[in-house]
Amino acid sequence: MEVFYYLVFGALSAVVAGLELGKSGKDRVATPTAFNAFKNNYVLVYSLMMSGDWLQGPYVYYLYSQYGFDKGDIGRLFIAGFGSSMLFGTIVGSLADKQGRKRACITYCITYILSCITKHSPQYRVLMIGRILGGVATSLLFSAFESWLVAEHNKRGYDPQWLSITFSKAIFLGNGLIAIIAGLFANLLADNLGFGPVAPFDAAACFLAIGMAIIMSSWSENYGDSSEGKDLIAQFKGAAKAIASDEKIALLGAIQSLFEGSMYTFVFLWTPALSPNDEDIPHGFIFATFMLSSMLGSSIASRLLARKMKVEGYMQIVFSVSAVTLFLPVATSLLVPASLKGNGISFAGSLQLLGFCTFESCVGIFWPSIMKMRSQYIPEEARSTIMNFFRIPLNLFVCVVLYNVNAFPITVMFGMCSIFLFMAAILQRRLMVVADLHKLSTKAQEMTGEDEPLNP
């Protein structure tokens, strides 16, 4: 493997270690023991849940191909997963608000375990059922756990600012370190120990079962709007009304969809972007490098949030930088000559890899920051429902991209993602303006209310 990959990985490792070890008093927030225990419990559960997800990622496509399915068949399986998340996500989100977030988290574990079990069958129909179950589980993963955390944090009376500590730690471990370890562990099971490509799915089911046991034994239940007379349709209407009546929520949903849509498109396109002429690249090592970049981003985010930096302000820069990084494939295709077929990574590929690492760092900043904004702007009574509403355009976009992945040149796809990210930066600017105006208006009303007794 080329020295270049080791240099990039080593440099990122050094920076991440330096940031974590070099945290000053300004970067650390003193918190009581009770909160630390609560935070550590959630981070442990979240890490187990994410390990169940990350273990499956490297071998999904490979397993399907080993069962003899072609690219078109596999593409339809992936579309089924995202389509399922789009169709059923809002329903399960509403049920989580009404029936309880703890129950929803347990349902995630059961649903994903069942999805893992289906991987033992080579029958297409069974695998399709597994993808549908996986889509439902994904909706719960990205809504129910966060909704439970925010509600439980507030119910226990902890400082709202401490939420960002939990978010940052969960993303640093669950979306960074755990992803790297899970990738290596999956490779050990499937290849080194010779258990085959279905072994990582069995391991994922075990981690999910352990996490479910911890949830059942240590988590209390909390709800959104659990009023008896309110059915699913009423909850949908309430969530839709909240989005339509509050520009801040609508802007937040648009920002999330634009960024995550670009992020998932990147997941599908980074391999052909780095090896357009079948260059020999170490996919697993590059994946680990991306995850290390994400850890760098979450470490930066924890410092920004600890210093109470304005999320709406610095995220404009993050989205703009992201847009530039995903425009690199377009720029290099125009300016840098193509490499010979079958060689190592080209000069253009090396530039793109550095850009993609920067993008993954932006992803690491994005997750705790968007969680922080959601905790501020989304009303508690319909939190899971609204968060899954946000995922409808995201999943629709990804389905369209998957269906047409061979219809457009890869540079067109990256150019489109770059435009979307610039749009996200613009909308983030608008969100900051609207939020500031709302704060000024609220402050003015409070001052007026205080003056009224003095002016009868």
Image (cartoon, grey):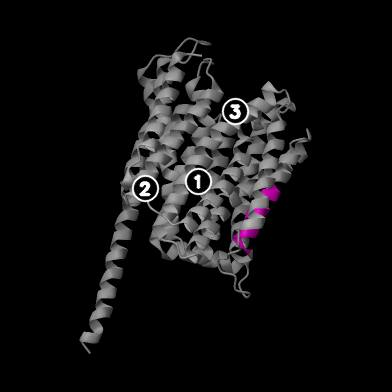
Q: Let me know if residue 409 appears in the view.
A: no
User: In terms of secondary structure, where does tag 1 sit?
Assistant: helix
Q: Which residues are magenta?
A: 100-111
Q: Which class describes the residues within 10 Å of circle 1: few (<14), some (14-19), or many (20+)?
A: many
x and y, in percent, of residue 76 in the image: 66, 37
x and y, in percent, of residue 436 in the image: 29, 60
Q: Main secondary structure of the magenta part?
A: helix
Which residue shows up at 43% across the image and 41% down it?
A: 298
The tag on residue 191 is none
Horizontally, residue 3 falls left or right of residue 236, namely left
User: In terms of secondary structure, where does tag 3 sit?
Assistant: helix
Comes first in the chain, label 3 or label 2: 2
Quadrant assignment for the C terminus: bottom left
Front residue of 364/12: it is 12
Which residue shows up at 46% across the image and 49% down it?
A: 167
The tag on residue 170 is 1
Horizontally, residue 229 falls left or right of residue 431, namely right
In whole angstroms, how far apart are the C-alphas of marks 3 and 2? 31 Å
In the image, is residue 372 above or below residue 189? below
| Residue hosting label 2 | 28
The tag on residue 184 is 3
In whole angstroms, how far apart are the C-alphas of marks 3 and 1? 20 Å
